[in-house]
Structure formats: C-alpha cells, structure tokens
Image: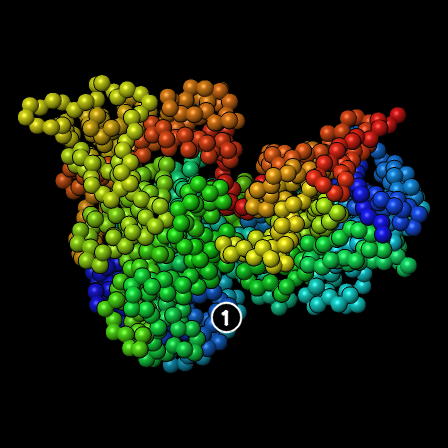
Amino acid sequence: MSVPTHVRLRAYRVGFGDCLLLTVTYDQPVDGRSQRHVLVDFGTVSAAQPGPSLAQVARLITEHTEGTLDAVVATHRHRDHIGGFGNAAAQQALSVLSPALVIRPWTDVPGDGTAQGLGLAETSVVASLRQLQEQARDVAFLAFDSSRAATRAAQLAELGFANPEAVSFLEEWSRPPSRAEYVKAGTRLDVAQVVPGVTVDVLGPPTLASVPDLAHYAKDSAEYWLRLAEQQRLPEMFAAPAPSARRQAREFLAPPDGVGAAAWLLDSLERAGVAQGFELIQALDDVLNNTSVVLLLTIGDRRLLLPGDAQVENWSYTLDAVLGPDGGPAPSARSAAGRLRRALANVDLYKVGHHGSRNATPRRLASQVWAARTTPLTSVMSTKAAVFGSTAQGAVPKAQLVSALQALGPVHSTDDLAPGVWWFDVGSPTTGPAAFTYQAGPPQP
Amino acid sequence: MAPRFSEAGGPSSRSIAKVGEPQAAGDIQEAPLNRVIAVPGWVGLPDADQLNLLVHDTVAMTILAQDVSVTADGRPVTAALAVPAERLQPGPRGHRFHVVDVAAGTSTAQAPVRLTDPGDAWTYRDHWRSPAPDPSAQRGQSAPADLAADRDFRAQNVFAVAAHTLHVFERCLGRPIPWHSGYPHLFLVPQARLEANAFYSREHNAVLFGWLPAVGELPALYTALSYDVIAHEVSHAILDGLRPHYTDPGLPDQLAFHEALADLVAMLSVFGIAGVAETLLAPSGTGGYLSRVSLSADPAKRAEELLRTPLTRLAEQIGRRRKLSALRASGELRPFTSWATDPVYAEPHRRAEILVAAFLHTLAAMWSERIGVFRRVRGAMDTERVAEEGTTAAEHLLGMLLRSLDYLPPVELEFADVVDSILTADQRVAPDDKHHYRDALAREFARWGIVPPSHSMLDEDGNRTSNAGDGTATEPGPYEPDPDASPPVVPGTGPRIRYEHLNLVSLRSSPEAVYGFIWNNAGLLEIDVRLDTVVERVISSTRVGPDGLVVHESVADYVQRVRVTGGTLPAGMRQPAGLGGDEPVTLLGGGVLVFDQFGRFRLHQRKPVLDVERQNRRLDYLVTNRIRGRDGYGSSDGAGDVRRFQLLHTDEEW
C-alpha cells in the first residue's frame, strides 16, 4: 500500500484572496501517479500588483497538477475564495481538470438541503443565504456615515453576494462520477480513494444546534439577519433618512421649534456617525465567513490546519469542545475532545485564517492550545496589505496576530514575495520532526 | 431578626407592601435600598394609579421585573418600583433623565411619551396599574408580547428603572451625583440602534439601547425592557460621573471595576425583587407556603450551598444576556490568587469576574451568617425566611459597596483599594459591626488575594491606620522628599496637621481652599506639591449608617500628573521593550481627602504618583497591550466611547 512520504502546500500570489495547492507525494505510485493534488480555494478581490491574472494562476495550477486535480475545497462562497472558478479565462484553463471530490460547506448544498438530511433550522439558513444575492441591490439604499463606508459596504456586498458563475462551475465539477461532500463540523471525511493516507477531520462550519434564543440574537445569530434579509425588510430599517426627517425629528423631540435640549443629542448622534448600514453589511459578511469549511489534515506525523475565513463564532464550536466551556473543566485527555485538542496542539502547518484579520484566529487557539508548543509552527498567509482596514485596529493582516504567530514559528506571506514571483511553497517529510522548508517559485519573465 | 429597612442606609424605616398585600395608596414612601415588589400582573388598590407628584417623595411606577420572556401564570412579572417624585414632562423627562425616542442614523423619531395627565405635569397616572375591579382591563395583564409592544410602557419602564438606580446610588452617598457631561440630564434612547446590545455613551451623554424587530417566530427584543440591562448601563453612567478617570488608560483593574460595579448593581437589584430569591431557592413547583430548603448546619458549607444554588443561577441568568458579562462565569469561580498574573485575566471583562466572584462569596458568607440562628427541621429551613435574609444581606452589601465610592482613589484604582475603601467607609457609618460583615468581606476578599494595602490610609493625626493590610510599606520614591515641605517644629509635640490660615467653610466647597490645606500639610500628607497637582472636586455628603448614625463629610479629590518620556522615566522605572525613548508617558497619581463636618481632616486615601512598582506595572501593561493615545502612553487619548465602554471586540480578537 502506498504511503505518503512528503507534503507540500503551495500558495499562489492572488493578492487579497486564497489559492492553495496541497500536494502529497507517495513512496510508490498510486494508480500510476506518485502525487495527489488538492486545490483549496481560488479567488481574489484585489489582485497582487504586480502579479498573475486569474487565468495565469489557473494555468499554473494545471501545470503543477500535471493536468490531474484530485480534489477541490471551496471553503465558502466569498469571491476572494471562489471567484477564480467564475472567471471565464480561468475556467478555460481549469476545464481540463476534473476533480473526483468537491468539498463545500453544508450551507452551500444545492436544492433545499432536505435530501442531505439537513434539519429545519439548517434548511432555513440555506434558503436565506440564497436570498443574499438579491439583497446586494438593496445596499445602495442603506444609510452610511460616509461615502467611504458606502464604498466599503458595496465592496463587501459584491464580495459575498454575487458569485453565481463560480458556484455553477463548482456544481458542474460536482456532477457524478465526481463526488460532492457538503461538510459540517464533527465529521471525518472518507478520502481514501482520492488522497490515500490522508485523514480529513472537519472542524467547521458547525450546524445550528437549535434556534437561537433571545440571548443569541443578532450579532451572535447569523440566522436573525438572514431572515430579516429574506423578508426584504432591511431597506426600511436601515434606509438613509429623507432630507426632511432630521428637521422633523428635531421639531418632534426638541421643543420649542427644534431648539430644545434634545437637539444637542440629535446633533451629537448625527455627528458621530452611527448609521448602521455598514454594520449590517459587515454582519452579513461575517455570516458568510462563518460558513467556512475548517479542515484538520493528518498526513503521517504531519498535521495541517486549513480554516478558510472562519471567524471566532465558527471556531467556538471546536474550541468550546476541546478547551471546555468558558470557565468550565477541560475535557479529559482520553476523550474524543481531549484527543482533538492534542491534535490541534500538534499542528505543524497553519493556513492563517481570513488573510490575517483580527477575528479569524481565535486568541484561545494561540494562548491555550499552542502556548506550550516546543516545536515551531509554520504559518502560511495569503493576503495583501492595505486592502481592508484603514486603521491599525482593523488592519488586515493584523500586526499583533502576525507577531504572535512569528513567536511560534516562521510566517510566510504571499505579500512578501519578490516582484515577479507568483507562488511559494512549504514542504516537509511526513515522518519525523516537522521540517518545513520554504521555497519561492521562479521569477516570471 | 435585624431591622431590615433601616439597614439600607435610608433615612428611616418605611413600609413596603408585599406580594398579595394591598399597597398603600400610590406611594411607596421609601422602599428599602433596592426593593421592588414583584406583582404578577397587578395588585393594588383603586386609585393607586393616580398620584400628585408634588406631595409624595416617591412614586410607584409599574415596570417589568424580569425579562419579558419570563412569565408567571402566563403573565409578565411586573413590579412597582419607587421612583423619586418630580414634575414629569413628555419624554418622559424629569430633572435627571430625558427619554428621547430617536433611531440613530435614520433619524426616525417617535413622539415623546406623556406619563402625566394632559395639561398637568404634576399628576402622574400609571396606566399599567389600573384599578382592580376589572383586572382584565389592565394593560399589565396583557400577554408579554403586548406589554413589550406598548411603546408608552417601554418609555415608563426605562425611565423608572434608570431613575430608581440613580436614587439608590444617591441615597447611599448622601448627595446628588452629577453626570460626566455636567448637564442635568442623561439621555435615554430606547430604540437607538438595531442590535441586541445597549451601552452608555459619554460622548452622547446617553444610554443607547438596542432593539430588534420580530422576525418569524422570534419576538421583538427591546434591551430597554430589561431591568438588569438598564441598571447596568446607568451604573456605568453614574460611575463615570463620580470617577471620570477610571476610563483613562491604566491598569486593567479600573475598567474591570467599571464592569463589576455595573454587574453587581444589576444583579443585586434583581435579587432585591421580592420573590426572586425565593424562586431561585425553591424552583417552580417546590416552593409555596411552608416550603423548606435543605441547608447545612455548618456556616461555611451553608455559604457554599447558597452560592451554588440561588446566587450562581441568577448570575448566570443575567450574565447570559450580555455578551461579555462578568456575571456569566463568576458564580462558578472558586477562590484562587494566580489570576493577578494570569494573562487570561488581564482583559478587563475577565478581570471583572474576579471582583464579582469575591462579592458573591462575601454575600454568601453574610447570608449564611444571618440564617445561622434559624431553626432547622430535619436539615431544612423555612424558604421564605431564608430568602428574606438573602435579600437583606444583598441590600446591605450593595449599600456597603456604594457608600464606599467616594472613598475610592480618583485615579489608578486597583482591587485592593476597593476592599480598603469599603472597610473604611463602613467603619465610618457603622462602627458597630454586629454581624461582622466587615470581617466576612475582608476574609472572603483575602481568599482571592485582594488585601487592603496598609500604606494607603492616613488618619487625622498623620498616623497610618492599623487596618488589616498586607503590610506593604511605602517604598521610597525616586526623588528626594521636598525639603521645604516638612511640618513646622513645635517643641514638645510631634508633627501634626495644621489648620492655620484656612477658611473652614471654604474647605467644604472650594478646590483652592483644599489645595491650600494640602500646601500647608504637604510633608505630612506625603503629597509632593512640586509636581503638577490639581484638586479636581470637593463635595459634601450626608450619610446615614445602618444604625442611624449620621455622618456629614466633605470629600476632596486631587490628581497628580508627571509627564516624562520613555527615556526620562523616574529612577526605578523600567523602560519596557517597545517603548521608544522619545515617546511621551504620563504618570498618574492622586487621592481622596476626607474632612468631617467641622472641617477637620479625617482620612487620606492615596495612590502616590511616584509609586515606582505600580507605575512599572501600569506602563508594562499599556505598552504590551498597545494602549496608546494621541499624546503617548498613559494620558487620556480621546479614543471615544468605543474604547471606554462598548469594548465590543471580544477577547478572542487580536
């Protein structure tokens, strides 16, 4: 039986997006091939400058896979993760590939999800997510504090809401004889036929355990905003005020004639910019990020953690399980959760979540799970600075996170590649101590 | 049983109606500190809904005692809450609160709500407490959703709970409390934003409450309907008026205290609602007349039982409503001391859990002590009496905490100062501590490693008081003492406080006069007036102790600032890694001077600006966490509300 001997993760320079190719090398050929390839995401919202076009990246993928891609993971439906699959020129290059396995989150299930055994709450979310696309057009009517916030909201809306070409391309790939897996946290995928010797544990996205109660509304509840969107009620609640509204509010609330004491408050609220249009769009954006597939791959002695853009809420399912609930006891070492904690603690390679944003690598992961590591953790980050987050607080990638990861081991970023270099990879033997070596691709002419 | 109502610190013991008893027409004279009456639906006498605001001290307003989703017999649990009586304008608007119903961002305005008769701002009418003869006509009898949907009721609810909360603080401190803004009113905006969150905003001089419209089977959610949310946020606003520097960049204890105080006021307020303690002790179906609760004969074990069942359960119930509430986990914590250096507890919300937990343990110990004399029958005690004692203990503890607020140092607060100030303030108003509450408090806090510093108190003769401190001696400062500040040498006597050249009347109200006092006594007070020293506030208070002892005092706060750079830190201070030599650093210190009614100096509670050990810890914390303002490290940076109270990013974020 063939055994993996080497693992390599290649990160393409797509700017603000993810495109990663996992290559497993075997001691003896499997069905005549000594390597297996898994593509994890392919998209960007802001290409690297200078850098390859999506079509050029697609051609590199076909070249690096030697025309045979075994599996593809589309972690979630944001454009910076799947947009490449919808790009016409890239599609042309990719069309020679026909992966045997397509892995997507349960929230992307085609149809209403009942065929896949989803519960009522889950099918409701699936239906709502589908509506988001239509909601994109409402964005223009929402209230924003500034044109900058409005622009940013439009960016976010476009990022998440409109990727039908990419989705249909992936669904084309999913047709039999290929296999489609719509995964959820807590499961182990059978990939023995596709990438033998690799164990794939799914850590996210979680399913909705129950309909959220009052305490878990809104920001804690993706479902709430989705359902509001579904009912077409967003514009009415977040709409920018008519020019006369402010004057009327004053006359109403600050007698006499709008110059009374409450006028100060109305002015103060207006000056501070507390319009919530942007927050809403951001909440919906978080909804999509939290549908990210989170995978823990075990290949020999190597462990790779690939979390897509999963944010804290998505992570909490796994972290609460392995660390014990807030303030509660940690699970015993011999329980399944205890074993998972050990596996997470021993991850050798981490694909930095959400391009290095502040809320996609939970602090608990670094401070509790990885704190006692004695071996280095290699991090791979696919990002582009200064695209999102204009303040130090909101910057992506976030400096504090990068420093914390650097304290654990090397951090390799696509943003640090020399001009003209379109990819780098990190590779390691699958047995013995982790020894990931970094290699940058050749400069392009 | 000890007298219950006078212990709360009110001027005298007053009557209060209990559930099922008829209430005196309209007026709850002076309820115990924190007591409201739970009334499923409504109980009262005819005409109780109408009140002349001119002739009553307080007015009973119907509010929602618990979350609208909690019902008794299918009806919302409402309560009559004592609110100071005053002329009421539409809003409602009294002289301290102004309800303004506007949606931030969209400027959607709703008409101000009138709680008084049209054309008569002095006649209040409680529409949700209408006459008994036809109970079905009462609006309070409606289904929870109907009551929540009544915008007028929501306006009354938020106004009444806010006004009551302020009233509780003011009674304990014996004086009116200003808002940070200096304006007489704090705005309450009941539907400010679409979110399941509420927050106090200093910038807007307002509490902005979030709400969410109903969707599908999820009912609408109004945070302005939740007693604990309102009490929590208004407590933030009150503390910001009392101690504005607690949100300046500093050690995490300060912000943690903000959270802990707000949480404790919220929780102890709910605990004070009649019936709540009883329900928690004997959950539904097991309570009722003659119900009994099993409790150990051993006081320590009994305290643990009380902590585990009613207190932790309530803390969790309330804590779940707020995303980062210290209440959520604090009930589960058991005493440990390593939190002080544990990075997990460096985050203010997590740190607040420690303080809240120490208070919950104290409450359990006080409660256990109070019921020690009760007869146990087959290991069980009468539930109602146990519950009553619990509410009394909670009221007493809340009173101890709130009365101490004026004694807290105005800057650089640490948890040790909290226990120190409580013990000192309580000693002043209740010298005879017959239930040994102070011992219980000191003992329970010591189990968490929170021990009053022995160096911070100085009595009227300049002697250090012999409290149960940690024995920490004042460390020598980085600079030689001011040679010109020594007290005059009077043959035959030791150094003592000098009152020469002082106008004792001015000393009660004038910062300049207090500065004159400091100037003449700088050496003895160990206040180095060569440094930037400002007396920020002088206030007078009249407090009544649980045994009726009336204490008149003047309290003056002073603040000292030393502005240096990373390269010119005072001797003994370390320059943390990451702090540039040219980076401005502001060191803060200050204290409280307490004078009695005759203008005599009584106490000095201080946080020396040149306490090198503390300043090193503070600077390390600020630099490590990159808490840097526009003017460098340690100065108030005008970062606005987000940093102050919203603290919205979770402890999982970077």
Residue found at x 16% / y 42%: B597
Q: Please state the total of marks drawn on the protein image.
A: 1
Identify which residue, B448 or A354, lies in the foreground: B448
**Circle 1 is placed at which residue position?**
B144
Relative to residue B489, is residue B126 depicted above or below? below
Q: Quadrant of residue B514?
A: top left
Residue found at x 26% / y 64%: B370
Relative to residue B78, is residue A421 depicted above or below? above
Residue found at x 71% / y 50%: A296
Q: Residue furthest left?
A: B492
Relative to residue B330, is residue B133 depicted above or below? below
Q: Is residue B592 left or right of residue B217?
A: left
Quarter placement of the C terminus of chain A: top right
Q: Position of residue B402 (x, y in %)?
A: 31, 50
Q: Secondary structure at mark 1?
A: helix
* Chain ID at mark 1: B
Residue found at x 24% / y 38%: B457
Q: Amino acid at mark 1?
A: Pro
Q: Position of residue A5 (x, y in %)?
A: 80, 43
Identify which residue, B233 or B142, lies in the foreground: B233
Identify which residue, B514 or A311, lies in the foreground: A311
On the question of residue B145 being in view, the answer is yes
Q: Position of residue A421 (x, y in %)?
A: 81, 29
Q: Position of residue A286 (x, y in %)?
A: 66, 49
Identify which residue, B635 or B30, lies in the foreground: B635
